[in-house]
Amino acid sequence: MSLGALLLVPGAAAQAEQGTAVRAVQDTTACAAANGPGQPEPLKATTITTIEQVYRCIFDHYYGSKALDGRKLLVAAFAAFAQELHRRGQDRPEAVMPALTGDRSGDWDAFGAVYQRVTGSLPQDAVLRQALAAATLGGMIRALGDNHARWQRTELPPGYQPGQEYGLGMTTFPSSGLMNGAPQQALPPLYVRSVLGGAAAEHDLRPGDVIETVDGDTPFAGGVLSPGVVNLLYPSYPRTSAVHLKLRRPATGRTWTVALKPALYEPAAKTVAAKLLNGDIAYVKLTGFAPKAADAVLKAITDLGTPKGVVLDVRGNRGGSSAEVDRLLGAFAHGKVTAYLCDGAGACTASRTDDTVPLLNLPLAVLTDRDCASACDHFTSAVKANGLGALVGTRTAGIVSGPATAYALDDGSALLLPALYHLGPGREVIDRSGTPPHHYVPTTAKDMSTGRDPVLARALTVLAG
């Protein structure tokens, strides 16, 4: 799942376009779009039937399926299965990848037969079997190399209420390298980006606090951010064990250790927060393109009176609805293409500004960073390509394969797949590369710890001319 604090809402994964619940499907080999919103179905064991659903769902709904060789999926799935067998000390002599011919159905039958023969020889251990199925599914989906394709299996903690989150109550930076499967892109140090509530708030963690160790391990090994270490900072239920951190606060030089126990909490951060700067500049922080986010931003600006410019801060914004992107862009220009969504045959449809939105007629500066992803990538690339304002900060994440739809699976989980792929307003590829800013201004942990914001300072200078 995404590396933000876990939103315990069905469909609220790396991208929140769907906001849909997961329902079980009747056909044991087909998948259907999740039908919600609402509470998810109770989770069941993930079985060979679930794995087959995912395999067939990819060919039924993924935009790149026509050119996809099923052997690529099955080889990756079996490799992950074999690795998990070995890791758990349960390898079997019959766990050998079968010969594949390129016939999708025939190859699945061969794969499924070996999978069932191997798992049939294993102890009747539900935890072991679930781990093997999860590893197999993960390997299959990773073979797509698509940052919007994922498997979502969310178990709700006891006492959960809508709007709550589960975890340590914080977000960290950097994380975009992990989100797009390229941890080598991230640079040290790893530090606290925001404190949302929960254990992090209770123990007085603050933005800019450097995380030196996680359960005794350093986040960076050989200059590469460790997914295993960082994933400890984003626990999902039923993981309840405390995470031990060694921290350093750059503003004071203090170092200390703390044990943070994951739990449910009410997030303190708002999707939209605004204030007036320098007497006439509207500053708006937008943490995600959730439903009605665009209207909330525009109301926040007008509530500040008659500002002479807008600073929109989308640093750390993990995305959401592309319709909200188009609506917000409609406040700064009309008649503009904001992106193209294309099918596997290359036929593209333009997304456009929502021209029902009144123009603000105000200069715009957008604050960006490497954790601006998905719909945020869409927004920033459209701002730059259409000349709607200045981007200030660092390059965006480049995690914008295409809008994902959730498909329900028989175990109560969901498969998220994009049916279309995203291109920028000039049909340029934003995915994997991101959008570079007009004004490159990085932020350090010390900046955050001491309350300095060089990105905002540069943006105000830009707007001042």
Image (spheres, rainbow, N blue to C red):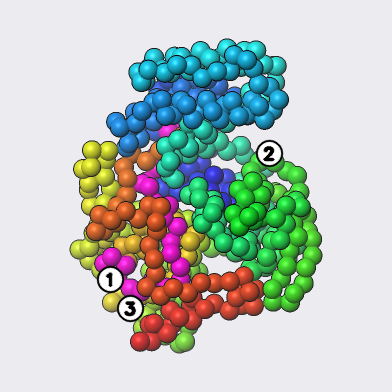
Q: Residue at x 73, y 43 (%)?
A: 240
Q: Amino acid at mark 1?
A: Gly
Neighbour class for label 1 at 10 Å: few (<14), some, many (≥20)?
few
Q: Residue at x 48, y 61 (%)?
A: 370
Q: Are marks 1 and 3 in contact (CB under 8 Å)?
A: no
Q: Amino acid at mark 3?
A: Pro
Residue furthest front as drawn: 222
Q: Quadrant of residue 382?
A: bottom left
Residue 435 horizontal side relative to residue 338, left or right: right
Residue 139 horizontal side relative to residue 433, left or right: right
Disc 1: which residue? 387
For the magenta stretch, what is the residue range?
A: 384-408
Disc 2: which residue? 238
Residue 257, x across and y down, in percent: 79, 61
Neighbour class for label 2 at 10 Å: few (<14), some, many (≥20)?
some
- In terms of sequence position, does the residue under pointer 1 or pointer 3 come before the other? 3
| 3D distance between C-alphas at marks 1 and 3 | 11 Å
Magenta span includes 406: yes
Tell me if residue 354 can be seen.
no
